[in-house]
């Protein structure tokens, strides 16, 4: 009975406010759309790419088909069960992950910290010092953002380990992800 | 900010990995690299002649990796001429040009007056998905010019930029700069500048 009564409301919410993309990480957690602090959509994509995408040339550089990316986005928005193996392909899944980051309110690296990151790179000469300062600065990110960034960096390190096949070394991945992380 | 009328701005668009940077670097520096390096956005400058005086050809090499609609719109509204690049080895890279072309039409309006070159790059590759006729057909549909190029083999690269400038009918732009004349012109401009300051 409760379920039936709640149905129209959820439907209404579907059409008025986005549920997965363009929603803050805290809101995703509140809605139960995160697993161990990581948005489920991100986990899905990372798991799928880990299995099927690591050796694909230009992973995260080459775009997926716009149509497929939009379709996948809508499926997630509607709360449908998405099977990337069946419904997507490697490049579209990769584009979807970047889209998620771009749509994240205030970005994965929150805008208030941008000047501090820039200053850190301008002021610090010594590499060791830079690394330490960077680690300290990253700790100032909100927990959910820090957690997701860590998860992504670990994954991208594994992508870069396959750079002989996928041609995406750390520098290339940084070029492609940078503008999606700093908005 | 006032428009810098002395600049002639060309913008290069296309999907990731079709060879936009390779074409630009071949044209500007005469070099080719096998390396696989994505672009965020780079601008190159070269002196050319425009209406019998010298001006700066400004070439903006855009990213193919992510769509930032605002950046794309800005590049289009600032650009005077456009190069739309696909790779003859990828049908999808040609399809990805459609929304960019539509955006240019939308922002620029009278498209017939805008120099646009559709370019099929990597013409040296044997594993083609597209032959030249398909490029020609799309170009005639879009009412723009078409050329196949190879940045790697230096085939049609100089010609591409020359042809693009030839399409500009609102002013006379040319890659040829008469060295002597331009120096004189420079002096003149310098003097003029001084006069106005005084």
Image (cartoon, grey):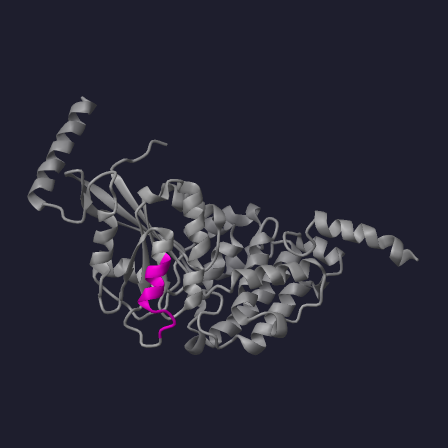
How many numbered dots are placed on residues in this image?
0
Does B130 appear in magenta?
yes
Q: Nearer the viewer, residue A121 or A107?
A: A107
Residue that appears at 41% across and 46% down: B104
- Residue A97 in percent (x, y) is at 57, 62
Residue B127 lies in what quarter of the image? bottom left
Residue that appears at 57% across and 65% down: A152
Q: Nearer the viewer, residue A104 or A110?
A: A104
**Taking A148 as reference, is B196 above or below it?**
above
Does B9 appear in magenta?
no
Residues drawn in magenta: B128-138
- Residue A90 in percent (x, y) is at 54, 71
**Taking B58 as reference, is A147 above or below it?**
below
Residue B145 lies in what quarter of the image? bottom left
The residue sitting at the left extreme is B180
Residue that appears at 21% across and 57% down: B159
Q: Is residue B176 left or right of residue B27?
A: left
Q: Quadrant of the N terminus of chain A?
A: bottom right
Q: Is residue B80 left or right of residue A163?
A: left
Q: Nearer the viewer, residue A45 or A82?
A: A82
**Taking A24 as reference, is A170 above or below it?**
below
* Visible residue check, residue A110: yes
Q: Main secondary structure of the magenta part?
A: helix
Residue that appears at 18% across and 49% down: B175
Q: Nearer the viewer, residue A167 or A78?
A: A78
* Visible residue check, residue A96: no
The residue sitting at the top extreme is B198
């Amino acid at each position: 009975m409760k379920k039936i009564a709640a149905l129209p409301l959820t439907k209404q919410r579907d059409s008025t406010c986005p549920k997965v993309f363009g929603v803050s990480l805290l809101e995703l957690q509140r809605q139960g759309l995160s697993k161990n602090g990581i948005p489920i959509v991100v986990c899905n994509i990372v798991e799928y790419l880990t299995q099927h995408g690591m050796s694909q040339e230009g992973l995260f550089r080459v775009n997926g088909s716009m149509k497929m990316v939009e379709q996948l986005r809508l499926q997630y928005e509607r709360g449908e069960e998405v099977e990337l193996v069946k419904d997507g392909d490697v490049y579209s899944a990769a584009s979807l992950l970047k889209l998620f980051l771009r749509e994240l309110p205030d970005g994965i690296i929150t805008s208030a910290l941008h000047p501090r990151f820039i200053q850190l790179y301008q002021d610090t000469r010594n590499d060791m010092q830079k690394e330490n300062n960077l680690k300290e600065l990253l700790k100032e990110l909100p927990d959910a953002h820090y957690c997701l960034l860590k998860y992504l960096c670990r994954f991208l390190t594994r992508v870069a380990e396959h750079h002989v096949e996928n041609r995406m070394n750390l520098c290339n991945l940084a070029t492609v992800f940078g503008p999606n992380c700093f908005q | 900010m006032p428009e810098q009328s002395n600049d002639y701005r060309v913008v290069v668009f296309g999907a990731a990995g079709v060879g936009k940077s390779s074409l630009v670097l071949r044209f500007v520096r005469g070099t080719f690299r096998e390396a696989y390096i994505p672009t965020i956005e780079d601008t190159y400058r070269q002196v050319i002649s425009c209406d019998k005086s010298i001006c700066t050809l400004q070439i903006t090499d855009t990213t193919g990796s992510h769509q930032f609609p605002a950046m794309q719109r800005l590049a289009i509204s600032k650009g005077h001429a456009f190069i739309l690049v696909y790779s003859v080895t990828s049908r999808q890279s040609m399809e990805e040009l459609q929304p960019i072309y539509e955006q240019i039409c939308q922002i620029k309006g009278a498209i017939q007056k805008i120099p646009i070159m559709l370019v099929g790059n990597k013409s040296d590759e044997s594993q083609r998905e597209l032959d030249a006729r398909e490029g020609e057909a799309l170009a005639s549909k879009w009412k723009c010019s078409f050329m196949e190029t190879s940045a790697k083999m230096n085939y049609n690269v100089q010609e591409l930029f020359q042809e693009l400038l030839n399409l500009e009918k609102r002013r006379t732009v040319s890659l040829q700069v008469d060295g002597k004349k331009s120096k004189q012109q420079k002096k003149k401009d310098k003097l003029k500048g001084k006069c106005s300051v005084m």
